[in-house]
Amino acid sequence: MNQFFSSLVGYIAIGIFLVLSALFTFVFPSTSVLDTGFASLDTFFSNAPLFFLFLIPAITMRMFAEEFNTGTFELLLTRPLKIIDIIGGKFLAALMLVVFAVLPTIVYYFSIYKIAAPEGNVDTGGIIGSFFGLIMLGASFVALGTFSSAITNNQIIAFLIGVLFCFTFYMGLDFLAKMPVFVGRLDYFIEHLGINAHYLAMSKGVIDTRDLLYFLSLIIIFLLLTKIVLTKRK
């Protein structure tokens, strides 16, 4: 956390996310809540993952790639820490940065709550589920970005691989499932391998254990893959 906020990285990441989300939610006419006539934050929750698609890999690209470049990874291994402790610490630090970025957007909820007619006529359950889903999506992107940073020494390559992984799991599998080649239950299976299907389910206000299990499994799998990569490097 200190590394993120001792430089401009943390502030820039949070600032860009808040500015973009505010512009798309309240300012731009084509997506503004004020122009749709509905007291809903669907615009924000549909655009936020697209912002995370680039911002989170930009945050995580330094995690291990920079350590490999500067030679501090070897120094880190001399500490009384297990590799899984190092991975967990870096993962949680980046996840907290994502949480700090999302927290100020709670103001959006209170804004539409006040301007709704009648006041308070909003789907609170759906919005709470969407916020929770957004955090879980962010945690998944952090795990994917962490793995991307562990497989290369170059930060730019780590960023590009991170964007590719996040795009594939968020939208790529959806596009793949819609191809006419996949019919029957195969398209359903491929679609539910992706993040978007589970994120949309949570945005309805229903926190299903199957969706939680999916997100936790995705996070654990990629953190374990990161551990395997770092163990081999060690």
Image: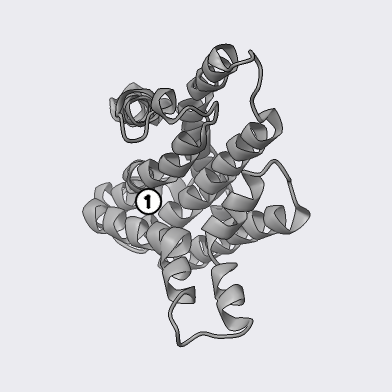
In percent of width and height, residue 139 lies at: 54, 46
Residue drawn at 44 percent across, 27 percent down: 33
User: Foreground: 10 or 116?
Assistant: 116
Q: Is residue 224 left or right of residue 48?
A: right
95 on left or right of 3: right
Residue 225 shows up from this direction: yes
Residue 78 point in image, percent of width and height: 47, 48
Residue holding disc 1: 64
Residue in the picture at 61% in, 75% down: 189
Residue 234 visible from this viewpoint = no
- Which residue is pictured at 59% across the width and 35% down the height? 131
Query: Closer to the camera, 62 or 199?
Result: 199
Q: Quadrant of residue 152?
A: bottom left
Neighbor class of circle 1 (other Cα within 10 Å; few <14, some 14-19, many 20+) is many
Image height check: is 40 above or below 130? above
Q: Position of residue 91 (x, y in %)?
A: 51, 44
Place of residue 46 in the rendered image (x, y in percent of width and height, measured from the top left): 46, 43
The amino acid sitting under disc 1 is Phe
The image quadrant that residue 234 belongs to is: bottom left
Most distant residue in the right direction: 209
Decide: is 65 above or below 184.
above
Where 80 sits versus 147, above or below?
above
